Image (tube, rainbow, N blue to C red):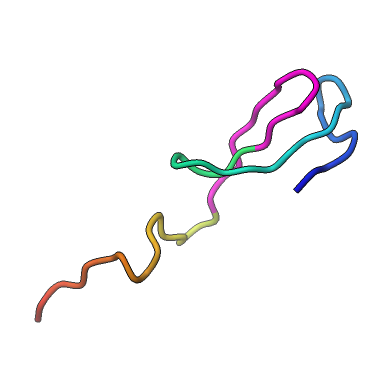
Amino acid sequence: MLNLKACPRCGGDVNSNRDIYGHYKVCLQCGYMVDVAKPEGALSLPRSRVKREAA
């Protein structure tokens, strides 16, 4: 998602993205970057990849 004029440092355009480390936002003009906090209780792996213990 692209947020126009949302950078706190330069007032430039901010792009939301994610990589293997999580979600982040980066300014396209000055390069300012900030990590986006993960919501409480969120899993880092999809449910299909989580191993369940045998009972």
38 on left or right of 51: right
18 to 50, vertically: above or below: above
Residue 7 % position (x, y): 81, 29
Residue 6 % position (x, y): 85, 35
Q: How many marks?
A: 0
| Extent of the magenta region | 25-38
Residue depicted at x 59% and y 36%: 35
Residue depicted at x 71% and y 21%: 31
Residue 11 % position (x, y): 88, 26
Residue 54 lies in the magenta stretch: no
5 on left or right of 17: right
Residue 9 position by quadrant: top right
Relative to the observer, which residue lies in front, 36 or 19? 19
45 on left or right of 34: left
Residue 52 position by quadrant: bottom left
28 to 18, vertically: above or below: above
Residue at the limit of the structure toward the left, as seen here: 55
Relative to the observer, which residue lies in front, 40 or 17? 17
Residue 30 lies in the magenta stretch: yes
53 to 26, vertically: above or below: below
Residue 23 % position (x, y): 57, 44
Residue depicted at x 50% and y 57%: 40
Residue depicted at x 45% and y 39%: 21
14 on left or right of 18: right
Quarter in which the C terminus is drawn: bottom left
